Image (cartoon, helix red, strand yellow):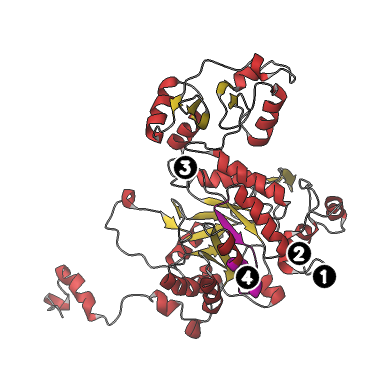
Amino acid sequence: MPAPLKDGVLNPAEALAHLQAYSSSDGLSVQELLNSQLHGGLTYNDFLMLPGKIDFPASEVVTDTRITRNVVLKTPFMSSPMDTVTETDMAISLALLGGIGVIHHNQTAASQAAMVRAVKRHENGFITDPVVLSPDHTVADVLDIKARLGFCGIPITDTGSLGGKLVGIVTSRDIQFEFPSTPLHEIMTTSLVTTPQGVTLHEANIILRASKKGKLPIVDDQGRLTSLLARSDLLKNQNFPLASKDPVTKQLYAAAAVGTRPNDRERLRLLVEAGLDIVVLDSSQGNSVYQIDMIHWIKQTFPKLEVVAGNVVTREQAASLIAAGADALRVGMGSGSICITQEVMAVGRPQATAVYAVAEFASKFGVPVIADGGIGNVGHIVKALALGASAVMMGGLLAGTSEAPGEYFYHDGKRVKAYRGMGSLEAMESGKPGAISAANGRPGSTKHAPQPTSAPHENAATTRYFSESSAVKVAQ
């Protein structure tokens, strides 16, 4: 104990030493705060974190995070697999900024696979499977590729496929003012800058910069096309240094959700063929024999595919999925801004307690945890990460942005987009013939703008909560 000075006042120089006189630190430790036997369950709004001491500059802060056993992102942000939140634009935009978007499965398998393919093709290192045409193809074929895939710089080989002899290339300028029926051999550029097979990516990028060309074909010693390099990818590397990319292929990471039904296995095959890196098993209750069987099948069939299992809120649930081989866990039940699972189904757990309990257990096995739901502001993100989550998954916080699906409309004088839960009646009607008109015509409907239509398909919302033949459905 420091000796008191005049009038009983302690020496200020001994203030730090005097802290040792206290039996405990100020406030509660996270173990004391999140002890559910003493305090029950806590949400993000039920507590604040005490400030500490800053002894480092902001420039030294690293936000790299491992969202699965083998995937590391530069920023801990993920978008939810909801049909009003994540499609192609959201997935690409988040990946470029260091996060990742999970493409929803309330659509046909072919449509979802096309979105995954678009994400994978958005940025590349060496493009080892480029789109290739032959001299006999027409401008109409190029326009179709541009409409579907978003680019039109296409190499031309004598066979119209990779491995054929490179004879030219078609760019956007080549097809301007040309009739759709014009054969490509009449307009393609034949004066090409190429580089031989075996060149490193760094060397190829230097050649591409110097050539001032949009594309750099890689050819073997017989002039056959083996791969391609794009200038647009150089610009993306410069503009988006935090982009979430596969360290080998240099392509953006792609994630998508599927269910656990037999049809989802065929859906997943299409997604993997499109280049999927991470699959999210989308279920309100992850601790089921169906999800465990699905994890076993995925690990046997696609051993390199990262599997995010869930949702869970307890250690007991987490243990089953970790033992089955899950590469990450999604935590949350009824905590979303428009989810009423806790009220309707009488199950769930306050999100802060759920994240801490599962993360503390899963960390012992090297399994990352994703805090899904309940994120209403930046402070909630910080709390989730402090409680052990590797990343946060957001729905409502991203809905309504320009990258989210849907068209803007005006409601009560405000410019908005539609946002709905995947257990809502409207989500359950999606994919059925005539579903849009029925939803908009229902008395009391809150829908003010039609959603884009798609081909009839198995509904992700009903298969997640009910059987397809259920006569009674509870809206969330």
Q: Which label was assigned to residue 470?
A: 1
Location of mark 3 (residue):
250
- Nearest the camera: 228 or 354? 228
Query: Residue at image x 17%, y 69%?
Result: 12
Residue 29: x %, y % from top left: 38, 75
Element marked by disc 3: loop
**Which of the two marks, 1 or 4, is nearer to us in this view?**
4
Mark 4 or mark 3, earlier in chain: 3
Q: Residue furthest bottom?
A: 37
Q: Is residue 20 left or right of residue 110?
A: left
Q: Is residue 334 left or right of residue 7?
A: right
Mark 2 or mark 4, earlier in chain: 4
**Which amino acid, mark 1?**
Ser
Element marked by disc 2: helix
Query: Residue at image x 72%, y 74%?
Result: 344
Q: Residues within 10 Å of mark 2 (few under 14, many from 20)?
A: many
**Which of the two marks, 2 or 4, is nearer to us in this view?**
4
Residues at discs 2 and 1 in contact (Cβ within 8 Å): yes
